[in-house]
Amino acid sequence: MTRLKTVDIAGLDSMLSLYEAELIAKTGDDLIGLACRAADISKGHFQKRVNALSIGLIPITSGQGIIIGFCDAVASILSHVGGKIFVTQKPDVGGWAESFERGADIVMMADDDRFVALNMTHRLVVDNAAATGRAFATGLNMMAGNLEDCAVLVIGCGPVGTSAVETLIRIGARVTIYDIHPSRCRDLKDRVNTPLKSAIRLADDPEPALTENKFILDASPAENIIKVDHITPETYISAPGIPLGLSEAARLKVSNRLLHDPLQLGVVTMLAMAVKHLP
Ligand code: 2YC
């Protein structure tokens, strides 16, 4: 899993309104709208519950340690969509104690392996990878109009790519998957319970797959895997992978038919999934 750098999230707070205006232009909806579609809940359900919630963010020092700005970036995204958000003064155990003392309904934290939202009252765990895969597949569907019966290429068969494939299958897309490790492709196909196992095609060479597919979801950390010759006027790309997998020329050519952010869509979708089962 790619570890964000402080530079990836610098200025995210001050750019949120511009980011959201661009999201509306690309997909027709805002952060809450896209996240609610991804989580399959109504905006009304989301807003009614989120406004009543207290959400604690706990910095975690394990492994490679704290990313300066990470919890503050998550807090700014959540504040943008509602809810009473706080970042605990202390990390780790002190942060947990503070979250309990302040009556947090949801606690969010990330170590080197997982970024989760924990619903304390309903004992629910929401994983950022699952939420991010749903969000970027949903965003691709919204950008492209409707992906039912359309061919979509998913690059990267990790947790985000797996969630994206499941979402695209639910949408009715015809999914081709590619991973630099072929065994991960086969594992994904075996793991994803689709009505038609054959609904998922495996690509062993990314080049023809990138040329044949106009709808691409890049959930890999590969750089420069999508090149300018892969981009046509009909190409739409949703790219949760960090760093962005498009060459500079490809990014310029695909123009605004590209969804990419380091945290925003995944974080709001985590919240939507965390409140989904609240009464
Ligand atoms: O500041 C902290 O609390 C750190 N322990 C946070 C580490 C996050 C590591 N994960 C990532 O950088 C990203 C996540 C945003 C989702 C996947 N990788």
Image: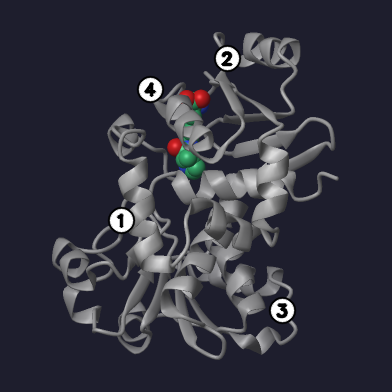
Residue for point 24% across, 79% down? 231
- Dot 2 or dot 1, earlier in sequence: 2
Q: Percent from the top left, x then y, of residue 243?
A: 32, 50
Instruction: Using the rendered view, name the quadrant where residue 210 is placed.
Output: bottom left
Quadrant where the C terminus sits is top right
Q: In this picture, is 218 found above or below 106?
A: below
Q: Are marks 2 and 1 in contact (CB under 8 Å)?
A: no
On residue 88, the disc is 2
Q: CA distance from mark 4 to mark 2?
A: 14 Å
* Real-space Cα separation, disc 3 to disc 2, in angstroms: 41 Å
Q: Secondary structure at mark 4?
A: loop
Residue 18 placement (x, y as % from top left): 30, 47
Provide the secondary structure element on which disc 2 rests: loop
User: Which of the pair 161/44 is nearer the observer?
Assistant: 44
Alpha carbons under labels 4 and 1: distance apart: 21 Å
- Amino acid at the residue labelled 3: Thr
Q: Given contact means CB atoms under 8 Å apart, are the residues at marks 4 and 1 in contact? A: no
Identity, as a three-letter code, of the amino acid under mark 4: Ile
**Spatial separation of the CA atoms under disc 2 and disc 1:** 31 Å
Q: Earlier in the sequence, mark 1 or mark 3?
A: 3
Gap between marks 1 and 3 measured at Cα = 29 Å
- Residue placed most toward the observer, 84 or 264: 84
Q: Residues within 10 Å of mark 4 (few under 14, many from 20)?
A: some
- Judge whether residue 178 can be spotted in this image: no
Q: Which residue is mark 3?
A: 194
Element on which disc 3 rests:
loop
Q: Which residue is mark 1?
A: 244
Badge 1: how crowded within 10 Å, few (<14), some, or many (20+)? many
Between circles 3 and 2, the one closer to the viewer is 2
The residue lying toward the viewer, choosing from 205 and 83, is 83
